[in-house]
Image: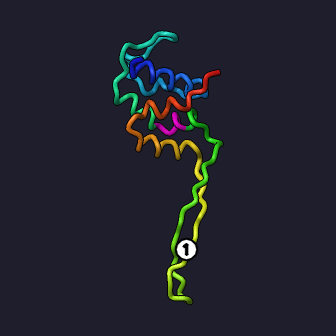
Amino acid sequence: MTNTERFLKILKQAEKNGFNSSKHFPEEQLMEKGEVPIYIRDEIMVGIIFDHDFAKTFFGKETVIEYKIDTQTWNEEEQRLKDGSVTQTSPAWKHHIKQLALSENRLGYLEKFIKYN
């Protein structure tokens, strides 16, 4: 399977959830429904997968990821560092964009979340 075919499967899921991909394609690459382009430039793929609207529709806005962050604060009274932790929450799409940026295989990362139904 080519990267274009893999990307189109990912894009199809986001479009099914309400993503409008047409603003990302140059006019010569816009296609009729059902027509598959032979090749989509890498810059277009990257531009789409890091688009916040794409991420919100692909991963969802509702799901929240919780992070527990270890912290150290200075305790003036005891004159020492005190260990603790803080819990932060983030929408799932923000978490996944960060993971996507770190991934060596971005299409592979996205393919793990394709829903087959």
Query: Which amino acid type is marked by label 1?
Result: Asp
Q: x, y percentage for residue 11?
A: 50, 25
Between 46 and 73, which is closer to the camera in this rendering? 73
Query: Is residue 52 part of the magenta span, yes or no?
Result: yes
Please identify the dominant SS of the magenta region: helix
Answer with the quarter of the image where residue 7 lies.
top left
The residue that appears at 45% across and 27% down in the rendered structure is 23
Q: Is residue 116 magenta?
A: no
Give the image's coloring scheme.
Answer: rainbow
Q: Would you name the residue on which mark 1 appears?
A: 83
How busy is the neighbourhood of tag 1: few (under 14 within 10 Å), some, or many (20 plus)?
A: few
Q: How many marks?
A: 1
Horizontal and vertical percent position of residue 111: 50, 29
Q: Which residues are magenta?
A: 51-55
Where's the N terminus, which quadrant? top left
Residue at 43% from the left image edge and 27% from the top image edge = 24
Instruction: From the top left corner, tell me how far across and down residue 91 is, in percent.
Output: 59, 47
Q: Residue at x 40, y 20 (%)?
A: 4
